[in-house]
Image: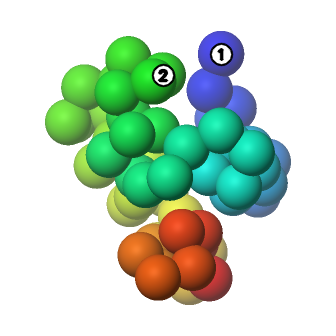
Amino acid sequence: MIPQDPVILLSFINTQLRDNYGSLEALAEGLDLSREELDNIISKLKSLGYEYHQGQNKFV
């Protein structure tokens, strides 16, 4: 369900945050992600140079 390719993952996560979830925590809960899975996603996106910005509710 969650894309493995980091670039597609970035698009998927930011789209989900924009359209369906008000926070990263809400996304994790809504997609039934464990803390480890969420940390893995954050790590993958960080490897591309993106970090979660709470005020914008997206990875920038």
Indicate which label's residue lies in the foreground, 2 or 1: 2
Q: How many marks?
A: 2
Estimate how packed mark 2 is, as few (under 14), some (14 to 19) or many (20 or more) residues with alpha carbons within 10 Å: few
- Residue 54 locus on image (x, y percent): 41, 75
Q: Which residue is mark 2?
A: 31
Left or right: residue 26 versus residue 34 is right
SS at mark 2 in the image? loop
The disc label shown at residue 23, or none: none
Q: Secondary structure at mark 1?
A: loop
Up-down: is 59 above or below 38? below
Image spot of residue 7 (x, y percent): 76, 57
Above or below, 47 relative to 60: above
Q: Quadrant of the C terminus?
A: bottom right
5 and 26: which is toward the camera:
26
Q: Nearer the viewer, residue 14 or 36?
A: 14
Badge 2 vs badge 1, beta-carbon distance below 8 Å: yes
